[in-house]
């Protein structure tokens, strides 16, 4: 017995030793990086975060294999600016990309994650959504979905690359994945580490599910309504009353599939008809009250949103399977996040832009085998300014210019440092679609203070007792000291990040034109 057990013990010890060597080799070699980045994906629609709306088994794999950040936020909850922050590690005022609608092309010549990694010998690629109105810089390979607003289409999208514009046939999540796997296939042979920004368009408006979800469409299935779907906004700040993002008033027939989706082939159009035509007929023949109509539109909206998430999640699974079968997972950091969250009926709204939890919080998952314990959760306050510093730290690259964010890797050391930190938020896109007032604010461990500086209005939320930002405590008895402290913290962040006192001049931007286009969208 003793003799037989000796080799077994020895074998186990050798295994541990070899495991240590493998870990050391991985730690010594620079890791590959695959950043899976989606568009408008709310935390409430990720099952790793306990979603009651949808299952996302592929995204959940990253949470199970690594860390789930439970308090990850963006500094400006709008598409292009969030992407500019990912690339620069800087808030909008410092990277110059404030707004989707009036910032102009992103200046890719400034210091970016991609250029720094490329300069350090990484192979670099961005495939899928770009939305920065410029050609990507710092990427050996880029192939981005293209059209005039850089949104692309869900079906048969055009892609733009140095070779020109390519028309394709298929569903966007499938195509972005096929192109990404093709590039990985090339990159893995090079022998140098790689960085892939695998950027989904999904689940951005107008929420077009892929073919499989159209085939499986169940008109009768219902999703749970949020408590605040019918909320009366009349007693709130003017900023909230005046926003044009109520599902009841501003969601379009195209959004809720009362009209045929864009750019479909006859076969795709037939699937579309099969999914929606009968439900549309019943809706048009019914005589609904306003309340019933909002309920119907909410269901169509959220169900097509989550079906789009499922279409994307399956493709993410395909890419993860590829990494796994090619034995790349052992030395690849895989991340999942989104450019911001989204209102899924809360306050009766759709869209994003606000510093509210549902729109400024993002899913953020990171798997790095041998470095992050599987199944870890973290409640550290982190922000998208931290993405670039974290990945550069992992790659052993020091930025030439300081970034606003910090590396998150110390959080995974045996003795993590204290993480006492406040987050800064600043939304600029007004005038702009949906009419959300400009605002800045601070998010602390417990509170959130927002200032709508065009209206001179404040809001204060206690996120422990009110995690959905519903009860404005600003000016209420008992909150004077807390408010004073939060104003000091806010000012401190503005000094730390050198936020200019005045916003960039957008005088040429024409509010009546924006309103006209919004009305046109409802009419079309
Ligand atoms: Ca977005």
Image: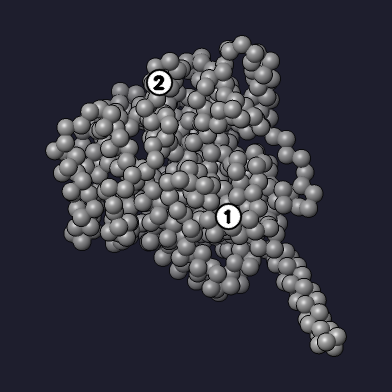
Q: Identify the residue under disc 2.
A: 233
Q: In the rendered image of this protein, does residue 20 appear above or below residue 105?
A: below
Relative to 453, 492 lies left or right:
right
Residue 303 x %, y %: 34, 46
Q: In the rendered image of this protein, does residue 313 appear above or below residue 247?
A: below
Disc 1 residue crowd, few under 14, some 14–19, many 20+, Cα 10 Å: many
Location of the C terminus by quadrant is top left
Residue 449 x %, y %: 59, 23
Q: In the rendered image of this protein, does residue 70 appear above or below residue 484?
A: below
Q: In the rendered image of this protein, does residue 418 appear above or below residue 164?
A: above
What sort of colour scheme is used for the picture?
one colour
Location of the N terminus by quadrant is bottom right
Q: Residue 63, which numbered label?
A: 1
Residue at left 36%, top 51%? 307
Q: Residue 211, which numbered label?
A: none
Residue at left 44%, top 39%? 342
């Amino acid at each position: 017995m003793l003799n037989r057990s000796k080799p077994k013990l020895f074998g186990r010890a050798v295994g541990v030793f070899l495991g240590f060597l493998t870990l050391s080799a991985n730690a010594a070699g620079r890791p590959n990086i695959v950043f899976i980045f989606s568009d408008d994906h709310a935390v409430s629609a990720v099952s790793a975060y306990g979603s009651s709306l949808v299952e996302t088994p592929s995204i959940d794999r990253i949470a199970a294999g690594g860390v789930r950040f439970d308090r990850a936020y963006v500094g400006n909850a709008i598409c292009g600016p969030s992407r500019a922050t990912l690339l620069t590690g800087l808030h909008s005022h410092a990277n110059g990309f404030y707004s989707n609608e009036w910032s102009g092309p992103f200046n890719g010549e400034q210091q970016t994650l991609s250029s720094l990694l490329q300069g350090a010998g990484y192979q670099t690629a961005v495939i899928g959504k770009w939305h920065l109105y410029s050609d990507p810089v710092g990427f050996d390979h880029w192939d981005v979905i293209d059209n005039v607003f850089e949104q692309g289409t869900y079906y048969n999208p055009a892609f733009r690359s140095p070779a020109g514009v390519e028309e394709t046939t298929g569903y966007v999540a499938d195509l972005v994945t096929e192109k990404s796997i093709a590039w990985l296939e090339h990159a893995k042979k090079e022998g140098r580490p790689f960085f892939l920004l695998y950027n989904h368009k999904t689940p951005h408006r107008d929420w077009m599910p892929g073919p499989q979800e159209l085939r499986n469409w169940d008109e009768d299935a219902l999703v749970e309504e949020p408590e605040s779907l019918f909320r009366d906004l009349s007693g709130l700040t003017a900023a909230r009353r005046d926003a044009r993002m109520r599902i009841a008033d501003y969601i379009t027939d195209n959004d809720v599939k009362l009209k045929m989706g864009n750019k479909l082939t006859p076969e795709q159009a037939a699937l579309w008809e099969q999914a929606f035509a009968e439900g549309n007929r019943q809706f048009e023949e019914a005589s609904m009250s306003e309340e019933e109509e909002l309920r119907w539109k909410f269901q169509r909206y959220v169900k097509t949103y989550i079906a789009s998430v499922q279409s994307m999640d399956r493709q993410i699974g395909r890419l993860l399977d590829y990494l796994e079968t090619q034995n790349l997972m052992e030395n690849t950091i895989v991340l999942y996040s989104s450019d911001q969250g989204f209102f899924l009926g809360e306050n009766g709204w759709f869209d994003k832009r606000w510093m509210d939890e549902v729109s400024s919080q993002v899913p953020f998952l990171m798997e790095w085998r041998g470095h992050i314990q599987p199944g870890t959760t973290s409640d550290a306050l982190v922000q998208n300014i931290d993405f670039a510093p974290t990945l550069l730290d992992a790659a052993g690259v020091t930025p030439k210019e300081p970034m606003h964010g910090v590396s998150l890797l110390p959080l995974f050391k045996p003795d993590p440092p204290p993480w006492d930190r406040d987050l800064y938020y600043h939304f600029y896109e007004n005038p702009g679609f949906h009419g959300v007032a400009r605002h800045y604010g601070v998010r602390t461990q417990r509170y959130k203070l927002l200032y709508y500086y065009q209206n001179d209005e404040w809001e204060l939320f206690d996120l422990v007792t009110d995690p959905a930002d519903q009860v404005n405590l600003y000016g209420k008895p008992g909150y004077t000291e807390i408010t004073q402290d939060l104003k000091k913290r806010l000012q401190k962040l503005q000094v730390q990040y050198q936020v200019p006192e005045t916003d960039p001049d957008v005088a040429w931007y024409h509010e009546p034109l924006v309103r006209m286009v919004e009305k046109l969208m409802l009419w079309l």
